[in-house]
Image (spheres, rainbow, N blue to C red):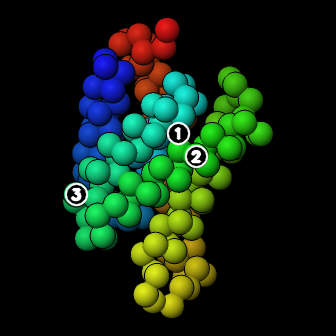
């Protein structure tokens, strides 16, 4: 129960920080902190707690957005499962480069799922979305990933989440 409470608080804090960064820098300067939270809990505690984090992150994001409710819950749950898949075949524990590869692949996968879900009734132009949406998000998320993971690890050690 303590893990779920910590995951809920961390998810809310990541959402609040992402919201503040979006209001300060706009779409170009905002890292995807909620995806990083889902990836971290998958790598640190496993798929079960990653899905819990995905549901919390999705609820917070869906409650504040204009997309149909459940869109981001689906995107973040897909990120949790995709992280498990990448972790099983590509991830090397303790490798910083390996964590960056996981973040890169999961952010690209989530972008594709999100683009498909949000553009189901419109013509899909991935070229323009790649340049104007994914490239800045991917760059800022990759830059923030190592720092966010180290701070989340310190926080989880503080609350002794891993037995």
Secondary-structure class at tag 2: helix
Going 45% across and 81% down the picture, which residue do you hit? 119
Q: How many marks?
A: 3
Secondary structure of the residue carrying numbered label 1: helix
Task: Tell me if residue 1 comes above or below residue 56 in the rendering.
Answer: above
Give the side of residue 29 with respect to residue 123, left or right.
Answer: left
On the question of residue 118 being in view, the answer is yes
Q: Find disc 2 in the rendering and name its residue.
A: 81
**Coordinates of residue 136 in the picture (x, y in percent):** 50, 63
Q: Position of residue 83 (x, y in %)?
A: 61, 43
Q: Secondary structure at mark 3?
A: helix
Q: Earlier in the sequence, mark 1 or mark 2?
A: 1
The residue shown at (47%, 36%) is: 50
- The crowd level at tag 1 (other Cα within 10 Å; few <14, some 14-19, many 20+) is many
Residue position marked by numbered label 1 in the rendering: 39
Residue in the image at 32% along x and 43% along y = 56
Instruction: Give neighbour class at mark 3: few <14, some 14-19, many 20+ (Cα, 10 Å).
Output: some
**Closer-to-camera residue (11/137):** 11
State which quarter of the image contains the N terminus: top left
Please give the label number shown on residue 63: 3
């Amino acid at each position: 129960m303590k893990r779920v409470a910590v995951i809920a608080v961390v998810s809310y804090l990541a959402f609040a920080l992402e919201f503040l960064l979006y209001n300060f820098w706009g779409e170009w300067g905002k890292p995807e902190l909620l995806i990083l939270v889902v990836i971290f809990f998958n790598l640190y505690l496993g798929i079960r707690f990653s899905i819990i984090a995905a549901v919390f992150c999705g609820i917070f994001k869906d409650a504040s957005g204009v997309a149909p409710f459940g869109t981001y819950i689906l995107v973040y749950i897909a990120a949790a499962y995709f992280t498990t898949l990448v972790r099983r075949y590509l991830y090397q524990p303790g490798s910083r480069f390996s964590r960056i590869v996981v973040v890169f692949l999961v952010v690209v996968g989530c972008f594709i799922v999100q683009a498909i879900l949000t553009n189901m009734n419109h013509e899909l132009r991935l070229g323009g979305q790649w340049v104007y949406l994914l490239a800045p998000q991917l760059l800022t998320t990759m830059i923030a990933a190592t720092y966010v993971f180290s701070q989340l690890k310190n926080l989880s050690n503080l609350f002794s989440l891993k037995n």
